[in-house]
Amino acid sequence: MFRQEQRPNCDGLSIMVERLRDDKIRDIFDTRQRTLAAGLDLLTWADTARGRPAVSA
């Protein structure tokens, strides 16, 4: 899906993705495609268009 130069080198993200179900990963990729089509970065989308509050740490 992503070329190497498009994604950061992040072991934590790799581990997280390995633990998710395939359908959840597909949902994430589909959402990312919609954000790109709308011209939104993920943080802007999360704050404005997602329709639910972000999970706080």
Image (cartoon, rainbow, N blue to C red):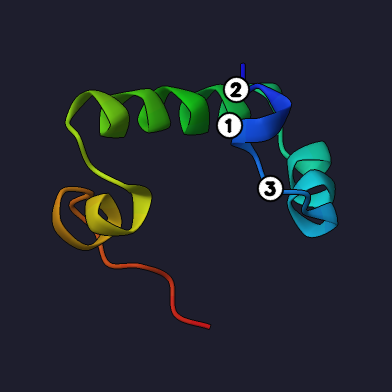
Q: Viewed as shown, does residue 1 lie left or right of 18?
A: left
- In the figure, is residue 36 to the left or right of 19? left
Q: What residue type is labelled 2?
A: Asp
Q: Residue at x 50, y 33 (%)?
A: 28
Residue 28 or residue 3, whichever sits in front: 3
Q: Give the x, y percent position of residue 5.
A: 67, 32
Q: Which x, y percent locates residue 18?
A: 83, 38
* Number of the label disc, if any, that sits on residue 24: 1
- Amino acid, disc 3: Pro
In the figure, 1 relative to 15: above or below? above
Q: How crowded is mark 3: few (under 14 residues within 10 Å), some or many (20 or more)?
A: few
Q: What's under tag 1, amino acid-wise?
A: Lys
Q: In which quarter of the image is residue 1?
A: top right
The answer to whether marks 1 and 2 mark residues whose Cβ atoms lie closer than 8 Å is: yes
Alpha carbon separation for disc pair 1 and 3: 20 Å
Residue 27 screen position, x and y as percent: 48, 27
Of labels 2 and 3, the one closer to you: 3
Residue designated by label 3: 8
Task: Identify the residue under disc 2.
Answer: 23
* Residue 10, picture quadrant: bottom right
